[in-house]
């Protein structure tokens, strides 16, 4: 079969009317940071679906489109298993479907990959008749053909040798002897194939599981390894305890840390590539009773979402935020606890308002994501480059928009206020429980109320809430007493159930809930008087502001989350 290779994917989709030229340019720009293929970037931006992408490619290239649900990608002959190695099939996402006299029919999700097609021809010794399927369907088809493979579990089982019980029963003294090895010994063990493979598999499994953090902790006779998925720590099968020093050393070497230093905390990081994904890892170690604990933060660039609607913002809250961030000057704060998505919201705001006509500068600690078109500065307190020092320098750089990673002290807060009052738009974060508390927090830091009131434009409090797994969620009718007591909004409610796709948690992914306070004249009067947060919040709610609790209930009424999750995130656990 001859494929029209002169056609480019972007041109095909534009000519088919599925995307516009501007959407194509946005996807191409996204590729520069996410390193996705063009089709994957368009799917991530939700301009096309996987099915639309595959159908138009198949139609334009003259090759059949196959669908897993219709049985098009299922084997009818087990002899097909011998045509290509399983490892190659899983890595390249290809699957032999039929063998003829002159050609082999092979399913793949990227028929424009000429190198892959050429390799397939060389490996099989026959011509290739390609058919196209979505990436999701290819993964399902390969699992159906070979079974779901848990490489991590296989590797972990191998660390215990013939007797898992014997290895698991190591004494504390044995573990301490391992920790007392020389730097040369630890470096050598960290480079052993078994240790390298284990660390690689843990990182791969964490990325594939959408984990945001990995916790590695030493205990007397075992290692504890947990992934934080959708905000909840979940244990995974750990390797034998005697490998702990070598695993820690391997991670330290990758992170460019001092493997001989075990008495003091250290920070480092490195970047990995998994297929088309590029993931930044920030690594932190601290000394604990039985050795060192390691926490790895994973920043998957391919999963970046800088669109307010995709983050979960809508309705009046979205209108207020859009109006606030397009103000020519003023002070905007995003508030919430650690891990509530504040940085992502800041990046979404910056991404929305950046333009060639504006000078946008940021100072962050650390710079989590690199954004094209803005000037980002990494804070370095050890050499005097603090948030406050960076802000003072920015004011001599003719800025239009300034973003500060966090306001922690009066000096930084004071410069932010002065910058906002002198014609700059300033965005930053605070650690407070709700929007109104940001006012009292700034006053407690020492900012004068009469200066704070005219500078504030927008206060946003937020939390991240788990989304129900769409494959296993079950309809739920809340008790009448609960409906009356909490004034539940009308809608269809669901409960979490649990299935293999969501690791039996009932949830898959997270979205934001928001409390958005537009600061206008009556609120400014209260702020300038130093009024308490309760009074400020009451007035804001009277003017239409929805609380975090109300935002959570709305998400539950829309079937996006459960009432249990809405209550636990905003007011505490509730037995339903």
Image (cartoon, rainbow, N blue to C red):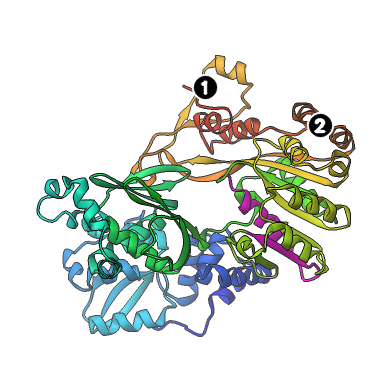
Q: Residue 478, which numbered label?
A: 1
Give the side of residue 536 with respect to residue 344, left or right: right
* Towards the viewer: 324 or 363: 363
* Towards the viewer: 292 or 493: 292
The part of the chain drawn in magenta is 340-364
User: Could you tell me which quadrant the N terminus lies in?
Assistant: bottom left
Q: Position of residue 568 (x, y in %)?
A: 52, 30
Q: Earlier in the sequence, mark 1 or mark 2?
A: 1
- Whether 540 is drawn above or below 143: the answer is above
Residue 78 visible: yes
Which residue is identified by label 2? Answer: 543
Q: Residue at x 51, y 62 (%)?
A: 302
Q: Position of residue 358 (x, y in %)?
A: 80, 67
* Towards the viewer: 518 or 488: 518
Say which quarter of the image contains residue 18: bottom right
Q: Residue at x 24, y 69 (%)?
A: 192
Marks 1, 2: nearer the viewer = 2
């Amino acid at each position: 079969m001859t494929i029209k290779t002169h056609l480019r994917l972007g041109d095909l989709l534009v000519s088919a009317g599925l995307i516009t030229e501007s959407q194509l340019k946005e996807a191409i720009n996204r590729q520069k940071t996410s390193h996705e293929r063009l089709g994957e970037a368009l799917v991530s931006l939700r301009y096309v679906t996987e099915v639309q992408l595959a159908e138009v490619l198949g139609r334009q290239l003259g090759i059949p489109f196959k669908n897993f649900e219709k049985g098009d990608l299922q084997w009818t002959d087990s002899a097909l298993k011998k045509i290509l190695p399983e490892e190659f099939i899983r890595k390249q996402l290809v699957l032999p479907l039929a063998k003829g006299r002159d050609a082999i029919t092979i399913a793949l999700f990227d028929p424009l990959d000429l190198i892959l097609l050429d390799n397939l021809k060389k490996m099989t010794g026959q011509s290739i008749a390609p058919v196209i399927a979505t990436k999701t369907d290819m993964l399902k088809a390969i699992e159906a053909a070979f079974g779901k493979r848990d490489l991590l579990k296989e590797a972990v089982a191998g660390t215990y040798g013939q007797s898992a019980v014997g290895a698991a029963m190591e004494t504390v003294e044995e573990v301490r002897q391992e920790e007392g090895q020389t730097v040369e010994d630890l470096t050598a063990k960290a480079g052993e194939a078994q240790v390298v493979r284990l660390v690689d598999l843990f990182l791969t499994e964490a990325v594939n599981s959408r984990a945001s953090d990995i916790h590695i902790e030493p205990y007397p006779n075992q290692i504890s390894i947990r992934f934080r998925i959708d905000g909840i720590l979940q244990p995974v099968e750990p390797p034998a305890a005697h490998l702990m020093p070598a695993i820690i050393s391997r991670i330290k070497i990758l992170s460019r840390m001092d493997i001989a230093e075990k008495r003091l905390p250290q920070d480092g990081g490195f970047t990995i590539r998994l297929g088309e994904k590029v993931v930044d890892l920030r690594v932190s170690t601290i000394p604990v009773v039985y050795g060192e604990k390691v926490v790895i933060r994973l920043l998957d660039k391919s999963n970046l979402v800088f669109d307010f609607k995709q983050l979960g913002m809508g309705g009046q809250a979205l209108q207020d935020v859009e109006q606030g961030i397009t103000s020519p000057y003023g002070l905007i704060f995003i508030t919430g606890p650690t891990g509530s998505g504040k940085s992502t919201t800041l990046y979404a705001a910056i991404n929305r308002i950046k333009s060639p006509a504006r000078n946008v500068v940021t100072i962050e600690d650390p710079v989590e994501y690199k954004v094209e078109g803005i000037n980002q500065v990494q804070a370095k307190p050890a050499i005097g480059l603090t948030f406050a020092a960076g802000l003072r320098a920015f004011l001599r750089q003719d800025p239009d928009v300034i973003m500060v990673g966090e306001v922690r002290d009066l000096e930084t807060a004071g410069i932010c206020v002065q910058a906002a009052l002198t014609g700059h738009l300033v965005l930053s974060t605070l650690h407070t429980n709700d929007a109104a508390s940001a006012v009292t927090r700034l006053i407690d830091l020492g900012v004068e109320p009469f200066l704070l009131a005219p500078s504030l434009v927008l206060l946003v409090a937020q939390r991240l809430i788990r989304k129900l797994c769409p494959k296993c969620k079950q309809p739920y009718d809340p008790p009448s007493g609960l409906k009356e007591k909490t004034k539940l909004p009308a809608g269809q409610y669901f409960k979490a159930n649990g299935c293999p796709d969501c690791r039996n948690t009932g949830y898959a992914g997270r979205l934001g809930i928001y409390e958005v306070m537009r600061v206008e004249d009556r609120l400014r009067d209260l702020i300038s008087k130093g009024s308490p947060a309760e009074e400020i919040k009451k007035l804001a709610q009277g003017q239409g502001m929805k609380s975090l609790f109300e935002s959570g209930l709305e998400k539950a009424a829309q079937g996006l989350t459960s009432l249990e999750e809405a209550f636990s995130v905003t007011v505490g656990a509730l037995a339903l």
